[in-house]
């Protein structure tokens, strides 16, 4: 068995570049989910702005893919309204992020997404959905944007 002393492994520029891309992807999702979780009416357009103009969104409760910008506005408003009526809160957590750079400069990502919510008082928060989210992220002047998103529910697979 051969052992390499700690600190002697070579770090390649590609490896350092990947670490930066990974950190950017994490920051992108933290920002995107924070906007989504505000559930304010004005946040709907901000969240939709994290998608490209021609983005496509696939959600398990929709009959087929929808143009993301128009579909998102409707989806976010409807979800926020349902939870306001129920006096509850809806939050999203993204973890187990896998980032795969593509030759064209885009990123293919796959992660787990937990949707949890609850109402004040006894019972508190609970997990409502466990999902897998697969995206294609593209670099734009304003930062990363989602060009395609497919969400599947783990509990229905």
Image: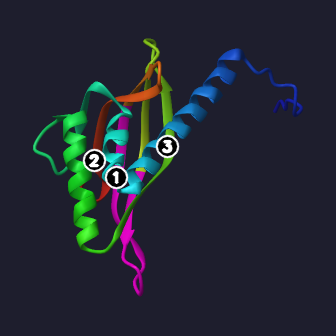
Residue 67 in percent (x, y) is at 19, 32
Label 3 crowd (10 A; few <14 / some 14-19 / many >=20): some
- Among all residues in the image, which is located at the extreme bottom? 122
Residue 22 horizontal side relative to residue 151, left or right: right
Check residue 4 in the rendering and tell me which mark sits there, or answer none: none
Residue under label 3: 31
Q: Horizontal and vertical percent for residue 107?
A: 45, 25
Q: Residue furthest left?
A: 63
Q: Residue at x 50, y 37 (%)?
A: 28
| Residue 51 position in % (x across, y down) | 34, 32
Labelled disc at residue 131: 1
Picture coordinates of residue 46 (x, y %)? 37, 40
Q: Is residue 76 above or below residue 13?
A: below
The residues colored magenta run 113-135
Write the residue at 31% across / 54% down. 154
Residue 154 lies within the magenta run: no
The residue under the point 19% across, 46% down is: 74
In this rendering, the label closer to the viewer, 3 or 1: 3
Q: Quadrant of the N terminus?
A: top right
Looking at the image, is mark 3 or mark 1 earlier in the sequence? 3
Q: Main secondary structure of the magenta part?
A: strand
Q: How many marks?
A: 3
Determine the secondary structure under disc 3.
helix
Q: Left or right: where does residue 107 sit relative to residue 23?
A: left
Q: Nearer the viewer, residue 55 or 16?
A: 55
In space, the residues marked 1 and 2 are separated at their CA atoms by: 5 Å
The residue indicated by pointer 2 is: 152
Report if the CB atoms under discs 2 and 3 are less than 8 Å apart.
Answer: no
| Mark 1 in CB contact with mark 2 (< 8 angstroms) | yes
**SS for callout 1:** strand
Determine the image quadrant of residue 15: top right
Front: mark 2 or 3: 3
């Amino acid at each position: 068995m051969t052992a390499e002393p700690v600190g002697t492994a070579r770090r390649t520029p590609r490896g350092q570049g990947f670490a930066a891309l990974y950190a950017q992807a994490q920051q992108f999702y933290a920002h995107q989910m924070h906007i989504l979780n505000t559930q304010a009416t004005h946040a709907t357009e901000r969240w939709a702005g994290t998608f490209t103009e021609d983005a496509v969104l696939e959600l398990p409760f929709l009959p087929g893919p929808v143009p993301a910008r128009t579909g998102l506005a409707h989806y976010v408003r409807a979800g926020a309204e349902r939870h306001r009526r129920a006096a509850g809160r809806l939050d999203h957590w993204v973890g187990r992020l896998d980032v795969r750079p593509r030759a064209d400069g885009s990123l293919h990502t796959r992660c787990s997404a937990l949707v949890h919510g609850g109402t004040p008082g006894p019972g508190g928060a609970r997990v409502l959905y466990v999902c897998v989210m697969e995206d294609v992220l593209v670099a734009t002047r304003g930062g990363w944007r989602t060009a395609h998103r497919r969400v599947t529910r783990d509990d229905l697979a």
